Image (spheres, rainbow, N blue to C red):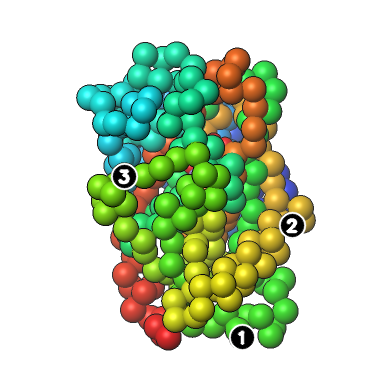
Amino acid sequence: MSISIKQLHPLFAAEMRGADLAGGISAATRRAIQQAMDDDAVLVLPEQRLDDATQIAFTSLYGPLELAPPVRGKTGTFIDGGRIRHREIFDVSNLDENGRILDLDDQRRAYGEGNQLWHTDSSFRQKSATWSLLHARVIPPDGGDTEFADTRAAYDALPQAMKDRLDGLIAEHSIWHSRAQLGGYMPTEEEREARPPAQHPVVRRHPGSGRKALYIASHASHIAGWPVEDGRALLRELLAFATQPRFVYTHKWRTGDLVIWDNRCTLHRATPFESAHYVRDLRRTTVIDTRVEVAQESCRVG
Ligand code: OGA
Ligand code: MN
């Protein structure tokens, strides 16, 4: 079956049909996906019948996979094994280890709700991420869309004076900064130590397209070397600029959709749904950015 591509938004995001990932893909299809990702940054592949192992195998074609942090139970303490056996799969659902909808006071609910803030995956890690791949297993009847923003287009649209101002700036990112914004999740001291902050340039060149992109997120807490409040204000301004409706594509999920996004040049956020009544089960694999140190060396640290 031949591959077809349809544009989903004037600036970015495309849908690709004709590639059956579970059946194993040819080198040509693999390159077509790479090319579509470099061009469009968000790629929707509908009707994919993937199980966890197949999703992991497909993701591995594009680099090493990040491992999900250890599973925590209802009260926040670590439990043995979760709902999903593979550490390469991030459980993006509202289900507990027995497959039941999480109680309203379950810590995992508070942690997951952090996804409703604009972010890019793993920017709080020094070895951050290139692509995330999210597969829809069970979708609620209403809501629970995912919104994406194009931070290459946003960078291009910035006034020149702002581009000059951003040149060489480094932001600090921490998972605990984004989680603190919603207030419901309290990390232990051990958790804080296990996941320390990371620093990345605010503007980076996206290697596949050669275009510059804003690298910001709700994880970004301040600008290195600046008074915290000044940095926070700038990051807030950039996030608001980059997520204007003209830069945003909203994905309405269908069961079987695999959506791939490039964390280096997009932002995303979950939108609410009736999570006490309906199941939403999506599973994410994430590719580690092994080039990130190179990018780091080429920027000036203030
Ligand atoms: C993620 C994420 C958004 C959603 O999986 O990284 O942010 O809509 N998901 O579930
Ligand atoms: Mn995410």
Which mark is on residue 164?
1
Which of the 4 quarters of the picture holds residue 142? top right
For residue 4, say whether it is visible: no
User: Identity of the amino acid at label 3?
Assistant: Thr
Query: Looking at the image, do the residues carrying marks 2 and 3 touch, with CB atoms under 8 Å apart?
Result: no
Q: In this view, does 11 lie to the left or right of 186?
A: right
Of helix, strand and loop, which one carries label 1? helix
The residue shown at (31%, 24%) is 82
The residue shown at (48%, 20%) is 103
Question: How many C-alpha atoms fall within 10 Å of the one at disc 2: few (<14), some, or many (≥20)?
Answer: few
Question: How many C-alpha atoms fall within 10 Å of the one at disc 3: few (<14), some, or many (≥20)?
Answer: few
Give the percent coordinates (x, y) of residue 176: 42, 52
Asked if disc 2 is less than 8 Å from ligand 1, the answer is no
Q: Give the number of marks.
A: 3
Toward the viewer: 178 or 268? 178
User: Identity of the amino acid at label 1?
Assistant: Asp
Which mark is on residue 188?
3
Q: Is residue 216 left or right of residue 190?
A: right
Image quadrant containing the C terminus:
bottom left
Toward the viewer: 263 or 244? 244
Of helix, strand and loop, which one carries label 3? loop
